[in-house]
Amino acid sequence: MFLGLLLQVSLLAYGGASVSGKKVISELLPDDGNADYGTGFNSINLCRTNTQPVVYEKLSSRTDNSLKSNFISQSFQMKHYRSRDELKTEFDNAEITATESVMGTSKSKFTKILSDNSLSVLDSFILVDIDVVTNVEHVQGRMSLAPAAHSLLMAGNYTDFISQYGTHFLRKKVFGGKLLFLVKIKSFSQQEKAKVDDAMEKLIGAIGNDADFKRRMETAKKLGRLEMSLFSVGGPSYQGDLEFDKVIDFALDFIGKIPGYEEVIENEYLGIWSLQNIPRDFVSAIFRYQHATDGIIDIFSGLREVEKSISDIGYLRFSEMSWLSDAGWNELKAVDRDSKSQRSSLQRRLQSEDIANLQSVKSQYDGIDDTLEEEVQEIVLKEKRYTLKSEMILKLSRTNRYMSSPSNAYAKVSPYYPLTMYLEKAGGDGYSHPLRFVALNNEVVHLRSPDYPGQLLCMAKNSYYVFWYKETGVYLPYCSWTLQHAEDPRKQFLEFGDEFVLTNLYWDSWLLGVGDDLNWVETRRSTDPDLQKYTWKMEKPDYGPTRH
């Protein structure tokens, strides 16, 4: 049986909903389908009470408790999702929220499928989702508080009542089965992800044509790393290794084989205040305490967002965020550990504190998620922003070719051995300030390499070629360059990963580029339509091609 709770109250950061005033709470795939009707649920501490605040007259079954062979409803959906957030939108009404799930303790396969940190920014998905309802059972007739619960409530001991009996009671169970089959392909970069998404879209369209489907599946698998997860409840168990076509066949058979295997797939709890003769100030107390719970869940969700951001950065370290150093990554991992520690502490406090103290718990942790998110942004900005004389390598944009060691002073590009370089402000040392793009303040720079001290990268007179010249024997404007961002001319600071063009200061209609053979560094006219031949990308030296 499923070990986590799925409530239809969406408390994660995506939805922004709350428990405050929620009259009906649905617990999807409950870990205890045998819970007795009338037992309580505490929406403030987010846990069951295992006591029975409500008594009732009788039960009513949709099938009158006979053999559950007739489906009340069934659905089969197979869909491609291009992002984690797009996938999560499907579960807006069933977010992982309660104590064993959103508060981080559930270890179930189903929770893992939907939890933030198992789904990355580089993942593309196909989800097969099957829902079958075979029977609905609910309490019927007169409902009232049990004598002991009634006495406690009438005595005005509201906090004791909520702690002992909860805020809601179990009034309905839904029987049937559910299957989730998640196919995930992890791309190597965001640029490659677009190819994966296109392949998965075509894969969905090929279902029903076995030969075409298998061919497209092999194409998709070659573009990234394939992972598959299967979860089912209330039906037969899948046997053997996970293979896409076999699982699809199993899923189609699954629907018809649920009768006889069905389990409780949903528990529905009704607010105790819906009963007659409940004091109005008791209802006000519940809503007040629930407001504190909402605040705690918001903080908890914010901490999960911090961890999700760091997790995504980890996946991008060797592609779009290759400028991140090991030291910077270690700083981010320390923030991640801090966030997890804060979440764990907050979880324990929510479950163990008297409900009257939850507002003070919220106040104690208020803003911690924002503080940690600011730390993440500061680390990223520090790592990404380029400062004058910092070492870097120049990569010809959208290729695997780097500015490399010269041959007889002729500058070259090559897929191997990128040349370590740095920018120096022309006419000043520029040590203390980040480099600004020329579009904003007319900055002029020299390009140097620690491997060739005393030399500058220069455009030669009466030649398209670019050479490394000794600075003492050359006219410096030939060796001076201005920078312009290739996509956003308004951008203020140069950062690793940026794409830009370099214009010669003396011959201002000529740009630093490469020849048509992609081997030699040459200058090209600014009117040249082949942008790829003169657009450069800055990377950190220790993240060159040998690290990919």
Image: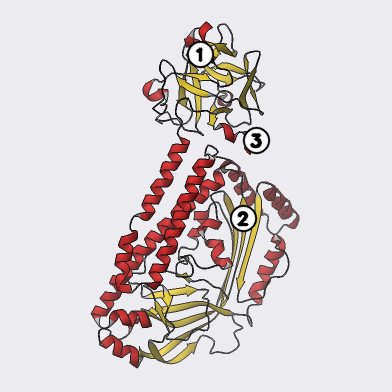
- Above or below residue 226? Residue 446 is above
Q: CA distance from mark 1 to mark 2?
A: 50 Å
Label 1 neighbourhood size at 10 Å, few (<14), some (14-19), many (20+)? many
| Residue 206 x/y as whole percent | 68, 54
Q: State the residue position of label 3.
A: 546
Q: Amino acid at mark 1?
A: Cys
Q: Which mark is residue 479?
A: 1
Camera-near label (1 vs 3) is 3
Image check: 125 left or right of 346? right
Q: Secondary structure at mark 1?
A: helix
- Above or below residue 106? Residue 477 is above
| Residue 529 x/y as whole percent | 55, 22
Image check: 178 left or right of 213? left
Q: CA distance from mark 3 to mark 2?
A: 27 Å
Q: Secondary structure at mark 2?
A: strand
State which quadrant residue 544 falls in: top right
Q: Amino acid at mark 3?
A: Thr
Image check: 510 left or right of 544? left
In the rendered image, which quarter contains the N terminus? Answer: bottom right
Write the residue at 67% across / 75% down. Answer: 236
Q: Amino acid at mark 2?
A: Lys
Q: In terms of sequence position, does the residue under pointer 1 or pointer 2 come before the other?
A: 2
Write the residue at 37% across / 83% down. Answer: 165
Nearer to the camera, 304 or 284: 304
